[in-house]
């Protein structure tokens, strides 16, 4: 069996795949590209995207479909794209792929117009990428060929008549998205304290873990448990101060009066006080396979005695 045929053979048996949703734009776009290569078929025409505002849907879509003009994104909306459904492909030439955001679309057009456009586009073998697909599904009476949900994790499913439905994906990713925003805000507070108050240069990389963040070092940081206790206490002080967290530009956020460089400036809670149950794990962990040393911060509902190996423990959806 060729690699090409093997890919589509495997897709027939795909229930879902789960990825941690990275917090930086570049990492989201890279993951989007990988998802396309691994999971998307040239014959997939209806792709449903599910996720709350600020979850990173636009960046993921841009990674999955480079060059696609969105009907709206963080920089505004395209009236011509939004109103395209009133001229079902008549003036769209040979364009093969269309984007639609149901939250925006329903503010300008009626649901029956949207359904007609989608069905017409599919009959003409166009590809549709539809954000907030869970809002369209009850009226369209057909499921997407690929469902992509983004919250704390990115869940990719190839539904059949047996499910999952867009609402199933919605019910997982919407409640979890807040932990991703909390974790990113806590990570940036930690970075602010370490750089500004401890005078340490940025010598670490960051990565993701469920309900938390990881700072990775090539050399073991010279810190004791007492140092980690002190760092945790200072981060908690800033959280308790309930300082505003705001987008400054595409590379920076503002926490209180401090400007801070950030790879995902839109993926934050609105104020530090919204970060729930922050704590540092009181140990610098070593990954012998990668030769890295890790400082781990957690938010949300992890138990106080959570073990490192359980942070990404498999759960049933």
Image (tube, rainbow, N blue to C red):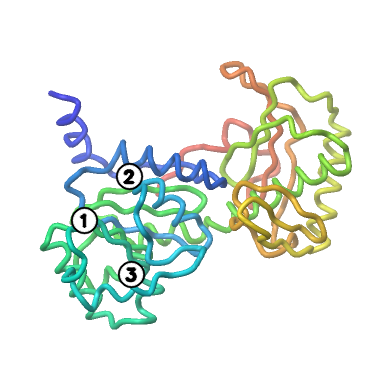
Mark toward the viewer: 2 or 1: 1
Relative placement, left or right, of 24 versus 139 is right
Residue 113 location, x and y as percent?
Answer: 23, 79
Relative placement, left or right, of 4 versus 234 is left
Q: Residues within 10 Å of mark 3 (few under 14, many from 20)?
A: some
Kindly indicate the quadrant of the structure image that contains residue 316. top left
Give the spatial CA distance, label 2 vs label 1: 26 Å
Residue nearest the viewer, comparing 108 with 90: 90
Q: Residues within 10 Å of mark 1 (few under 14, many from 20)?
A: some
Q: Which residue is mark 1?
A: 96
Q: Which residue is mark 2?
A: 16
Q: Which residue is mark 3?
A: 81
Kindly indicate the quadrant of the structure image that contains residue 77. bottom left
Residue 70 location, x and y as percent?
Answer: 38, 61
Give the spatial CA distance, label 3 vs label 1: 14 Å
Work out which quarter of the rendered image holds the N terminus and state it: top left
- N-terminal of the two: label 3 or label 1? 3
């Amino acid at each position: 069996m060729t690699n090409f045929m093997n890919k589509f053979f495997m897709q027939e048996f795909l229930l879902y795949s789960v990825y941690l949703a990275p917090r930086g734009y570049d990492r989201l776009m890279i993951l989007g590209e990988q998802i396309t290569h691994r999971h998307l078929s040239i014959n997939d025409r209806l792709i449903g995207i599910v996720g709350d505002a600020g979850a990173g849907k636009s960046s993921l879509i841009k990674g999955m479909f480079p060059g696609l003009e969105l009907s709206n994104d963080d920089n505004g909306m395209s009236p011509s794209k939004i109103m395209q459904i009133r001229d079902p492909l008549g003036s769209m030439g040979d364009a093969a792929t269309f984007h639609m955001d149901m939250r925006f679309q329903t503010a300008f057009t009626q649901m029956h117009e949207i359904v007609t456009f989608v069905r017409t586009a599919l009959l003409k073998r166009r590809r549709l990428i539809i954000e907030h697909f869970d809002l369209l599904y009850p009226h369209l009476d057909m499921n997407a060929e690929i469902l992509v949900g983004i919250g704390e994790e990115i869940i990719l499913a190839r539904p059949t008549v047996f499910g999952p439905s867009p609402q199933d994906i919605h019910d997982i990713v919407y409640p979890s998205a807040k932990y991703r925003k909390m974790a990113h805000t806590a990570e940036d507070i930690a970075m602010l304290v370490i750089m500004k108050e401890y005078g340490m240069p940025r010598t670490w990389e960051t990565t993701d873990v469920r309900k938390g963040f990881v700072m990775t070092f090539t050399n073991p940081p010279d810190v004791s448990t007492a140092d980690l206790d002190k760092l945790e206490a200072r981060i908690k002080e800033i959280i308790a101060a309930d300082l505003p967290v705001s987008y400054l530009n595409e590379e920076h956020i503002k926490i209180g009066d401090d400007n801070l460089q950030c790879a995902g400036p839109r993926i934050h809670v609105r104020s530090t006080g919204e970060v729930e149950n922050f704590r540092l794990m009181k140990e610098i962990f070593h990954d012998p396979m990668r030769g890295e040393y890790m400082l781990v911060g957690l938010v949300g509902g992890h138990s106080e005695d959570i073990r490192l190996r359980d942070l990404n423990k498999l759960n049933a959806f």
